[in-house]
């Protein structure tokens, strides 16, 4: 198991990003003594799903602003 903080550091993402992944059910964590951990299996599943494009969304391009 890996501490969630180490996972966040190793992935190079922010705390809110991982919070969203957990909330959406994309990343499974285990609570041990009040601290979140990630299993190697959960990391592998997450990376495989990401590689398949399961989390991809089309970019939202803002409409051009009208002038005048």
Image (cartoon, rainbow, N blue to C red):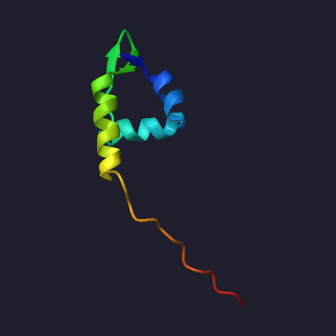
Could you tell me which residue is drawn at 28 percent across and 35 percent down?
A: 45
Q: Quadrant of residue 38?
A: top left
Q: Is residue 47 above or below residue 7?
A: below
Q: In screen coordinates, is 38 left or right of 41?
A: right
Quarter of the picture holding the C terminus? bottom right
Could you tell me which residue is drawn at 52 percent across and 33 percent down?
A: 15
Q: Is residue 62 above or below residue 66?
A: above
Q: Position of residue 64 (x, y in %)?
A: 60, 81
> Total of numbered circles in the picture?
0
Quarter of the picture holding the N terminus? top left
Among all residues in the image, which is located at the extreme right?
68
Q: Position of residue 40 (x, y in %)?
A: 32, 23
Q: Position of residue 55 (x, y in %)?
A: 34, 51
Q: Position of residue 42 (x, y in %)?
A: 29, 29
Among all residues in the image, which is located at the extreme top?
33
Could you tell me which residue is drawn at 33 percent across and 53 percent down?
A: 53
Instruction: Inspect this view and state whether residue 26 appears.
Output: no
Instruction: Inspect this view and state whether residue 60 appears.
Output: yes
Along the line of sight, which residue is nearer the eye, 54 or 33? Answer: 54
Along the line of sight, which residue is nearer the eye, 13 or 67? Answer: 13
Among all residues in the image, which is located at the extreme bottom?
68
Q: Is residue 38 above or below residue 55?
A: above
Q: Is residue 18 above or below residue 30?
A: below
Could you tell me which residue is drawn at 33 percent across and 25 percent down?
A: 29
Q: Quadrant of residue 57?
A: bottom left
């Amino acid at each position: 198991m890996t501490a969630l903080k180490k996972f966040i550091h190793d992935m190079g993402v922010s705390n809110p990003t991982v919070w969203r992944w957990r909330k959406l059910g994309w990343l499974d964590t285990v609570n041990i003594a009040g601290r979140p951990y990630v299993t190697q299996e959960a990391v592998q599943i997450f990376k495989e799903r990401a590689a398949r494009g399961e989390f991809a969304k089309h970019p939202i391009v803002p409409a051009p602003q009208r002038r005048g």
